[in-house]
């Protein structure tokens, strides 16, 4: 049977950082202005005043200390509260394609592969900047890859679902090399004026190159097995789409057109789903907890990751066994587990096993068991 392997990976990190203190100062200034503007209605008990956010809460509830974004000026302006992302002309590269080029080139360079030898690009992300032509086809064109390309969206699980799709195509022989790229511009679909979630997301792009293992030129990770699962839930939802226009033809400022979640429910319902998913995947692949050298988990919440890590390992994992990057990047949707993989995998030695797992809206959960090959 043909064996797929991850032979390259790369991360594009935006240059702008928002610390929790900067974020909270902007939010509180916005809340104060809003409360002043609605003082009469608040005093009459018709509406509730907006409460302040706090750095202490953000760190304690999530473990997030800062986030990278494409534009901080708009986000931190209390009169704007969203990133200023310039609408590009149809003749210019799109914002997602531009981030993707950087991450994909890093993955290609690591593997020593030229773009022309890639015959599949999957752009797997939780939001796409347009409906069509597919962002992936634009990336294919800009990079100069052959074959074909398509977009897919499984929210926070997009990367692992993309890896399974690419690995299966390599196994079947329909492609030889695939790029799975995750340009996540989460700042554009986050409601920065909502205290419950304004701290959650950041922007980033990750990419992995998957090849037939016999084509690998350097150290790589064999993809031993993959597993994907979904179960419908409304607890993480974004209604933005072509139904945004109202009957009167007006565009509405509707809260449900950005990321929304029932965070507590997600926390409670997703934990058992993910723990059981990983346990059954490992059992079917004949991998015991004691065989696992590393866990690269979805990066949404530190407490959640600590819980899953303990369940999977049967003990509290050492920090190097379950690296977290969410303190620096926040939740970057599908890219989070791949950032962790990309930054914390080079030290692994021949035969070491690791597991990538992402989870989120849908609900969806995807896991990939990899084995290090240095020879
Ligand atoms: N600053 C200060 N206080 C805040 C706050 C903020 N920014 N946001 C909420 N609070 C308050 C709430 O109003 C609430 O107050 P109350 O007890 O008086 O009602 C209290 O803090 C607790 O809020 P809650 O929303 O229950 O916090 P939490 O401990 O559940 O943490 C999340 C919130 C979102 C960090 C957490 O639920 C989570 O990470 N869930 C999983 C998310 C996830 O994985 N999503 C997938 C997305 S892809």
Image: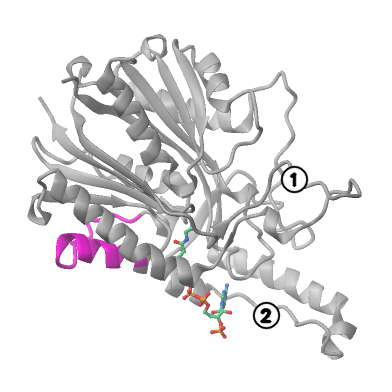
Q: Would residue 75 be visible to someone looking at this image? A: no
As measured in the structure, the alpha-carbon distance from the residue carrying label 2 to the one carrying label 1 is: 32 Å
Left or right, 74 with respect to 235, comes to right
Q: Quadrant of residue 197?
A: bottom right
Residue 305 in which image quadrant: bottom left
Q: Residues within 10 Å of mark 2 (few under 14, many from 20)?
A: few
Q: Dividing the picture into quarters, in which one does residue 132 lie?
A: top right
314 or 362: nearer the viewer: 362
Residue indicated by mark 1: 243
Question: Magenta stretch: residue 128 in it?
Answer: no
Rendering coords of residue 209 (x, y %): 34, 26
Location of the N terminus by quadrant is top left
Q: Nearer the viewer, mark 2 or mark 1?
A: 1
Residue at image coords 36%, 40% = 160
Give the residue displayed 34% in from the left and 15% down from the top: 175
Horizontally, residue 373 falls left or right of residue 330, namely left
Residue receiving disc 2:
51
């Amino acid at each position: 049977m043909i064996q797929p392997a991850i032979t390259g990976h790369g991360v594009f990190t935006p240059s702008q950082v928002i610390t929790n203190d900067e974020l909270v100062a902007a939010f509180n200034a916005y809340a104060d202005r809003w409360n002043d503007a609605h003082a009469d209605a608040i005093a009459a008990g018709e509406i509730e005043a907006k409460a302040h956010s706090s750095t202490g809460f953000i760190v304690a509830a999530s473990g997030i200390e800062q986030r990278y974004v494409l534009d901080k000026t708009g986000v931190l302006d209390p009169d704007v509260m969203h990133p200023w992302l310039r609408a590009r002309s149809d003749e210019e590269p799109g914002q997602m394609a531009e981030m993707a080029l950087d991450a994909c080139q890093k993955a290609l360079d690591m593997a020593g592969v030229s773009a022309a030898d890639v015959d599949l690009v999957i752009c797997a992300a939780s939001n796409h900047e347009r409906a069509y032509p597919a962002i992936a086809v634009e990336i294919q064109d800009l990079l100069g890859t052959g074959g074909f390309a398509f977009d897919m969206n499984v929210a926070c699980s997009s990367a692992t679902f993309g890896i399974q799709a690419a690995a299966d195509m390599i196994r079947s022989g329909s492609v030889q090399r695939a790029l799975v790229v995750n340009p996540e511009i989460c700042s554009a679909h986050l409601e920065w004026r909502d205290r419950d979630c304004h701290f959650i997301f950041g922007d980033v792009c990750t990419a992995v190159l998957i090849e037939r293992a016999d084509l690998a030129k350097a150290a790589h990770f064999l993809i031993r097995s993959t597993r994907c699962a979904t179960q419908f839930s409304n607890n993480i939802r974004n209604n933005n789409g072509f139904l945004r226009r109202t009957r009167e033809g007006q565009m509405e400022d509707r809260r449900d057109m950005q990321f929304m979640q029932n965070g507590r429910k997600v926390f409670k319902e997703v934990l058992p789903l993910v723990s059981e998913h990983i346990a059954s995947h490992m059992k079917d692949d004949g991998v015991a907890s004691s065989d696992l050298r590393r866990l690269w988990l979805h990066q949404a919440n530190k407490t959640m990751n600590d819980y899953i890590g303990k369940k999977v390992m049967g003990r509290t994992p050492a920090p190097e066994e379950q690296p977290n990057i969410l303190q620096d990047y926040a939740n970057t949707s599908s890219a989070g587990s791949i950032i962790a993989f990309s930054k914390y995998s080079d030290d692994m030695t021949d035969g070491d096993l690791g597991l990538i797992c992402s989870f989120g809206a849908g609900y969806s959960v995807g896991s990939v068991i990899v084995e290090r090959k240095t020879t």
